[in-house]
Image (spheres, grey):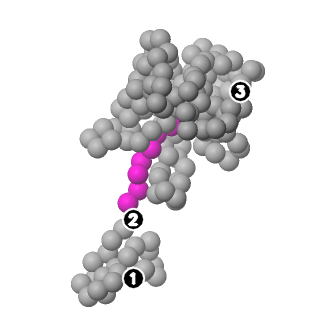
Amino acid sequence: HAAVQTDHENAMRCPACKYSQYPRIQPCVIVAITKGSQILLARSVRRHTNMYGLIAGFVEIGETLEQAVARETLEEVGIALKNIQYMSSQPWPFPSNLMLAFKAEYAGGELNLQRDEIADANFFDFDDLPTIPPKGSIAYWLIDQARQAQ
């Protein structure tokens, strides 16, 4: 039998056996990394603009959110973090992502970019930021929170 949308929840239900299938979400992490009075911003190789954003990526099976933040940062820019703290979340219904926002502090290492992901990355002064994501995005909110904490 073909599953049908239920009226009272976000699920598809088989009319024969009454089994409900719920949509899967893909958890992602995003992190605002500060180093003193600076913030790490990166430009993706997939972005065809000069917009800089934050380090982000998918959570892998078997890791905590904090481990995902540390791993993605080490993979993409080669640095270690400390004081990783959850801040907020933002659903992205298409393509079924849940973005979990963190802040962290630089703990060590030299910037070493994963060139198939990151075109450029650097620590920027808050009063001299490049183009960043627009208001309404969790990336903008995280950058603004870090700026206000200075």
Position of residue 43 measured from the top left corner of the image (x, y, whole percent): 59, 30
Image-quadrant location for residue 83: top left
Position of residue 113 measured from the top left corner of the image (x, y, whole percent): 48, 21
Q: Which residue is mark 1?
A: 4
On the picture, is 52 further left or further right than 99? right
Question: What is the secondary structure assignment of the residue under circle 1?
Answer: strand
Local crowd at mark 1 within 10 Å, few (<14), some, or many (≥20)?
few
Disc with the residue nearer the chain's start (2 vs 3): 2
Q: Which residue is mark 2?
A: 23
Image quadrant occupied by the C terminus: top right
Q: Which residue is mark 3?
A: 130
Q: Work out how far the residue at label 2 is from the one at label 3, CA to CA, in angstroms.
A: 37 Å
**The magenta segment:** 23-32
**Vertical placement of 44 versus 98: above or below?**
above
| Picture residue at 38% right of the left edge, 76% below the top | 12
Disc with the residue nearer the chain's start (3 vs 1): 1
Identify residue type, mark 3: Pro
Mark 2 vs mark 3, foreground winner is: 3
Camera-side residue: 32 or 116?
116
- Whether residues under marks 1 and 2 lie with C-beta atoms below 8 angstroms apart, the answer is no
Image-quadrant location for residue 6: bottom left
